[in-house]
Amino acid sequence: MTTSNVDAIADSLTLDARDPELRKADWASDAYQAHRRSGPLKLGFLTFLTQERRDPSTVLQEGLRLFGEAEQLGYDLGMVRVRHFQPYVSGPISFLSAASQHTSVMRLGTGVIPMHAEDPIRLAEELQTLDVISGGRVEAGFSTSMPEQGIETHWAEQVKTKHDSWDKFDSFLDRVAGKPLLSEPDTFMWGLPEGSPAITRPEAPGLRDRIWYGAGSMNSVQQAAARGLKLQLSSVTDEAGARFEPRQYQQIAQYRQQMAQLHPNRTPEVAVSRNILPITGAASDEEFEWLVRFYTDNICPNGTGRPGFPAKGRFSHPATGTMDQTIEYLRNDVALAAADTLVVLVPFYSDLDKTLPLLKMVIDEIAPALRSGA
C-alpha cells in the first residue's frame, strides 16, 4: 500500500474533519488548554480476540501470550473487548484470570462489560476473586446499555429501561465497595462469627476505586463522574454534530470538573482509545488498508455501507499514514492530550504475529514522540 493510496483513503474519511491545519489550530487554542495532561502518558491496548475466522482455542491462547509479551514491552494496561452472542470474548473474567498468571504488573481491564447481562452479587464475587488472584490489578470497565433486541434472554425482563440497568450497576458498586446486604440480625453463616455482615467475598480493598465506565455521551460522562468512576472514552461518540476530538475534550473537561467538585479526594483518570495504523511496508499493511476502507465504506456519509451496520454518532479517524504522519495526527489530538492513558485498538482480525509489531511500534516510536512533544 503506497503513501498516495493512504492519503487518498484518509482524505475520503469525511465524517469527522481531518484538515491538519484545523487540528493544529485546535491544539493551539486556549479552549483546549485547561485540562491538558500534566503527568506521563500511560499506554494500554484493547483486543477483540476475534474467533470468526480461527479456532477459538488458538485465539485465546494467543491472547494470553499477547498479554504476557505486551507487559514485557512496557504496556501499563491490557484490556479485552466484551461481546455476547458474537465471536469475541464473552467470558472476560475467566480469560483475565488466566492472563493474570502470564503477567505480574500490568493492569487487567475490560472494555466493556454490559451490566444488563450480569447479576450484581455474582459479578462482584467473580471480580473480587480475580482482583485477589491478580494482586489488585483489576481495572474493569462497564456500560449500562440495553439488552440485545430479538434474542430471547431473561435480561430483557430484568432491564426494561436504562434506569433498570443503572440500578443493577449501582448495586454492583455497593457490593465491591464492601457495603453489606440487608440481612436478619441472627442470620447464621458458616465460618463467620454471629452477626457478621453479609458482604461479597473475598474482600478486595481498592477495587471500587478501579472501576471504569465506558461513556459515549455527555450524560453518561456526568453519570460516571457522579459515581466517582474512572472514565473510558472510545473511538466513537453517541453525539453527532461537533467534531469528534473537540467534543471528546469537552466530555473530559466536564468529567474532571465534576470529579473535583463531587469527589475531591479521588484522582480522576481518563483513557481514550484510538485506531493507530502506521503504514511501514510491513506485512500488516494489507490488513490496515482493509480497516481504513472499512471506515470509508461503513461509517462515512458518502460510503457504500452495508446492511446491519447503521452509523450512529460520530467516529474518530484512524491515525494512519507514514510513521511521521501518524505521530503528527496523534500529537494534534486535543482529547488525547487531556487523557491519562492512550489505549491502542488492536485491529479486528490481527493474529499475534501482526499485533505485537504494532504494539512495539507504538512503544518504540509513537509514544516517545507524544511524551516529548518533539
Image: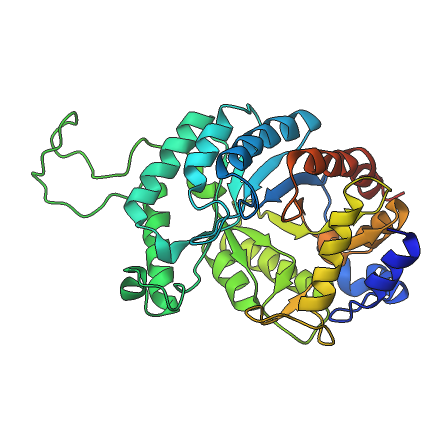
Image height check: is 37 above or below 155?
above
Image height check: is 136 above or below 322?
above
Which residue is located at x 54 percent, y 69 percent?
A: 308
Q: Measured from the top left, where is residue 29 in percent x and y?
A: 83, 64
Q: In the rendered image, which quarter contains the C terminus? A: top right
Image height check: is 184 above or below 13?
above
Which residue is located at x 10 percent, y 41 percent?
A: 185
Q: Is residue 22 left or right of residue 310?
A: right
Q: Measured from the top left, where is residue 118 in percent x and y?
A: 34, 51
Q: Is residue 66 left or right of residue 224?
A: right
Q: Measured from the top left, where is residue 303 in percent x and y?
A: 72, 72
Q: Is residue 221 or residue 7 the one in the foreground? A: 7
Which residue is located at x 34 percent, y 49 percent?
A: 172
> What is the image's colouring?
rainbow
Which residue is located at x 37 percent, y 58 percent?
A: 116
Q: Is residue 220 left or right of residue 201?
A: right
